[in-house]
């Protein structure tokens, strides 16, 4: 459980899988960005090939600088004690944060623009990881900071670093205003669709009686396995040491229903 006076870290259970997943996502973004300079109804030209090379380089530059920056200061910003596994999470997720942020304008950034977009993405990713921890919001995979915040930053950054229409290149606020408006509209639609989805799933869960399904005898037999009983014991022990009275009562009621405990087991765990 997460305590009020310290941050919570979830260490990855399988480091090779973490690296493999990051590599697959990076490869997908490279293919996606590098082919964005082509048109389905046109032939391959030297300009489109140069655009492909530019998209690839900018994607790698932004991802690289974001990964290095996240490795360097994420633990300092979030205030957690980071070991090798936590550092690896920051490195991999920082890489994805930079790649996500640069995708919107990778064809229209110069080298400096791509580096700045990637570095700011690492900063935003680290800050919003801290905010989620402080707000006690469970986002174990850090999806919202990476795809939500850094994706929004990447859309806004087009209005700032576009080599022809960007604010920092002397083109005024026109492009930036368009990007800001689009970002707000997309965020509003995502929130609306999310609320509808969660409301529907909540209603369907209530009507389908999922709790009754879990408590059926066949599931009870499955949950009687030693691994589940050990989890139940650890959960009760942690709550007894760190939780409040209401948390202890709630956890005890939950574990007694979901993880059945015989009287002999209760005597052993006291």
Image (cartoon, rainbow, N blue to C red):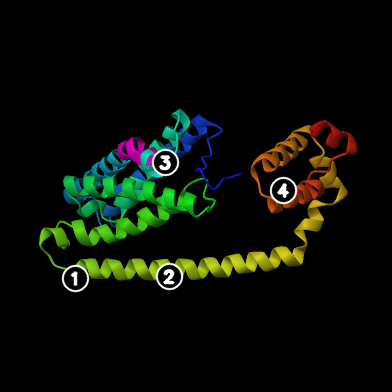
Give the total number of marks visible in the rendering: 4
Residue named by callout 2: 188
Point out the tag, 4 or 3, that comes first from the N-terminus. Answer: 3
Give the crowd class for mark 4: few <14, some 14-19, many >=20 residues within 10 Å: some
Q: Is residue 116 left or right of residue 154?
A: left
Point out the tag, 2 or 4, that comes first from the N-terminus. Answer: 2
Contact between labelled residues 3 and 4, with CB atoms less than 8 Å apart: no
Residue named by callout 4: 248
Q: Is 111 in the magenta?
A: no
| Mark 3 and mark 1: Cα distance apart in space | 39 Å
Q: Is residue 35 visible?
A: no
Residue at 48% of width from left, 49% of height from top? Answer: 133
Q: Is residue 28 left or right of residue 12?
A: left
| Mark 1 and mark 2: Cα distance apart in space | 22 Å
Point out the tag, 3 or 2, that comes first from the N-terminus. Answer: 3
Q: Is residue 36 visible?
A: yes
Q: Quadrant of residue 169?
A: bottom left
**Which mark, by number, is residue 79?**
3
| Mark 4 and mark 3: Cα distance apart in space | 28 Å
């Amino acid at each position: 459980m997460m305590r009020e006076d310290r941050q919570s870290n979830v260490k990855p259970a399988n480091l090779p899988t973490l690296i493999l997943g990051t590599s697959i996502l990076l490869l997908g973004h490279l293919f996606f960005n590098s082919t964005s300079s082509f048109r389905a109804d046109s032939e391959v030209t030297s300009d489109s090939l140069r655009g492909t090379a530019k998209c690839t380089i900018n994607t790698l530059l932004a991802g690289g600088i974001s990964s290095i920056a996240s490795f360097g200061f994420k633990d300092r910003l979030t205030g957690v004690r980071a070991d090798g596994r936590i550092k690896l999470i920051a490195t991999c997720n920082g890489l994805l944060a930079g790649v996500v942020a640069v995708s919107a304008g990778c064809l229209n950034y110069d080298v400096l623009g791509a580096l700045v977009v990637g570095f700011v993405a690492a900063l935003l990713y680290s800050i919003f990881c801290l905010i989620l921890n402080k707000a006690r919001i469970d986002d174990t995979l850090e999806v919202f900071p990476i795809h939500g915040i850094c994706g929004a930053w990447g859309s806004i950054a087009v209005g700032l670093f576009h080599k022809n229409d960007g604010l920092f290149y002397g083109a005024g606020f026109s492009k930036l205003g368009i990007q800001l408006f689009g970002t707000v509209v997309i965020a509003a639609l995502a929130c609306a669709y999310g609320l509808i989805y969660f409301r529907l799933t909540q209603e369907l869960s209530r009507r389908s009686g999922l709790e009754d399904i879990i408590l059926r005898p066949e599931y009870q037999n499955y949950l009687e396995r030693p691994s589940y009983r050990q989890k139940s014991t650890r959960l009760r022990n942690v709550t007894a040491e760190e939780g409040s009275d209401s948390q202890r009562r709630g956890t005890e009621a939950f574990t007694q229903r979901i993880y059945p405990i015989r009287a002999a087991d209760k005597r052993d765990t006291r």
